[in-house]
Amino acid sequence: MQRYREVFPAFHTLYRLTTTLDDLSSFAMGVCRLYRNAFSADKVVIVCKGNASQGFIKICLENKRSQVKKGGISILTRVERELLKQEKELVLPNRLIYPFVFTHVLGGIYIKRGSHANGFSETEKRWFLSLCEEVSLGLKIFELYQEQKKIMLNYIKSLSQFLNQYVPTSYLHTKIIFRLIKAMTKALKLSTVEAQSLEYASLLHDAGKMQVPSQLLKKQQPLTEEEFKLIAKHPRKGVQLFKNLEILKPAIPIILHHHERYDGKGYPSKLKKEQIPLASRILAVLDTFDAMYFGRPYRRKRRLKEIEKEFRAQRGKQFDPRIVDVFLSILKRKNIQKYFKLSSKK
Ligand SMILES: [Fe+2]
């Protein structure tokens, strides 16, 4: 009865881990803890197969210490390799060892109690196997989600290239900007979903300009009030294009508000300060940087020193001061400077 009380909530925890999972390591760590608590295990080891670039992820919990290893097959012990190869339960005293299988092997687990403790009962073995089935399902969902994400990113990249034929400034210069996005999202502690959505939005934020007459987008003279009103519709038009694509849903507010200003004088909703989604405030900085560094039909290219001065002048007005500070410090990093040197040679 006691074990029942511990194991039963584990299924609920597992369901929660599966439905909120966005990175394999934290899922595996959650599963490890769950098994340790549910089975009073002294040691739990989980091995998961990541994608081609990740290799394997191995998590070991022992005596309240945790260890995470990532790498090729060499991080696995002989027993772990055997488990993945055989696709079936291994029988060893005082341990439960089982592969996670769903159409193919996705990983494996073993749990162990110290020699002082009792062995696992038949009921515990059944609970263990049922939980393993659930974990296998979770890993399969994660694998499918990763595949879907890859397909979607390729689709978005193709779409942005297509858009670029109509609206030459509709997407940011990807290599440098992606590098900057990664550095900014890390420094500003965005979640994986927010960071991913910012990448999508950086490629698609100006797609709504497809519905703006192209001579207006290329115009070098100042815009009339009417012309500006037409261009200012592009965030909403962009949202209309993508609102039904499930994977782009978190990117929609970022696209909609990428022209808001920190002082509330932007468009379309005149949001101010923290009312503007954080990722939109970041995109506003990157979009302006892209326009200044690479130039636009209506704007000459600027040098990094001039750009820095402009951002400082707009700190707290057009842009979030905290984001400007983070951005300017990132621009000074050696690895980022290297990117600019490479791009200027092209
Ligand atoms: Fe825009």
Image (tube, helix red, strand yellow):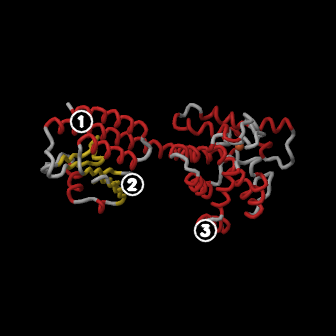
Q: Is residue 263 above or below residue 294?
A: above
Q: Which residue is mark 3?
A: 334
Residue nearer the viewer, 155 or 113 = 113
Q: Amino acid at mark 2?
A: Ala
The residue under the point 35% across, 58% down is 69
Is residue 168 visible in the rendered structure shown here?
no
The crowding category of the residue bearing disc 3, from other C-alpha atoms within 10 Å (few below 14, some 14 to 19, many at least 20), is few
Which of marks 1 and 3 precedes in the sequence?
A: 1
Q: Are marks 2 and 3 in contact (CB under 8 Å)?
A: no
Image location (x, y in percent) of residue 200 = 58, 45
The residue under the point 30% across, 61% down is 75
Q: Amino acid at mark 3?
A: Lys
Which of marks 3 and 2 precedes in the sequence?
A: 2
Position of residue 84 in the picture relative to residue 211 (left or right)? left
Q: Which residue is mark 2?
A: 52
* Ligand 1 rendered quadrant: top right
Image location (x, y in percent) of residue 178 = 59, 54
The crowding category of the residue bearing disc 1, from other C-alpha atoms within 10 Å (few below 14, some 14 to 19, many at least 20), is few
Q: Amino acid at mark 1?
A: Ser
Q: Which residue is mark 1?
A: 130
Which element carries disc 3, helix, strand or loop? helix
Give the alpha-carbon distance from disc 2 to disc 1, as whole Å: 28 Å
The residue under the point 27% across, 32% down is 8
Which element carries disc 1, helix, strand or loop? helix
Q: Are marks 3 and 1 in contact (CB under 8 Å)?
A: no
Position of residue 43 in the picture relative to residue 171 (left or right)? left
Q: To which quarter of the image does residue 325 belong?
A: bottom right
Which element carries disc 2, helix, strand or loop? loop
Q: Is mark 1 within 8 Å of ligand 1?
A: no
Image location (x, y in percent) of residue 203 = 61, 46
Give the alpha-carbon distance from disc 3 to disc 1, as whole Å: 51 Å
